[in-house]
Amino acid sequence: AALAAVSSAQYTGPCSNNACGTQGLPCPRGYLCVPYPSFNPADRKGCTCSY
């Protein structure tokens, strides 16, 4: 069960404003790179730019 929780917590791609999501692209000015669909690491599937 612990192994499943760890694998689901990994997001696809980097999760910073300078490199966000599967493409690793910088977020536009005024946007933040946030985890989705949940901030809970166990439910996180990826990261995306959001305002």
Image: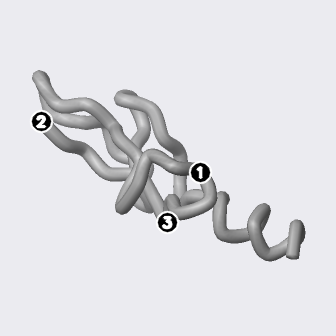
Q: Nearer the viewer, residue 32 or 26?
A: 32
Seen at 79% across and 75% down, the residue is 4
**Could you give the CA–CA distance between mark 3 and mark 1, rounded to whole angstroms?**
8 Å
Horizontal arrangement in the rendering, residue 29 relative to residue 26 (left or right): left
Tell me if mark 1 has few (under 14), some (14-19) or many (20+) residues whose alpha carbon lies within 10 angstroms of its own.
some
Q: Which residue sits furthest front?
A: 1
N-terminal of the two: label 1 or label 2?
A: 1
Q: How many marks?
A: 3
Seen at 35% across and 41% down, the residue is 34
Three-letter amino acid code at the position of disc 1: Pro
- Residue marked by disc 1: 41
In the displayed structure, 17 sits above or below 39; it is above
Q: Nearer the viewer, residue 27 or 32?
A: 32
Give the secondary structure at mark 3: loop
- Residue marked by disc 2: 51
* x and y percentages locating residue 48 in the rendered image: 31, 51
Horizontal arrangement in the rendering, residue 21 relative to residue 41 (left or right): left
Q: Nearer the viewer, residue 7 or 39?
A: 39
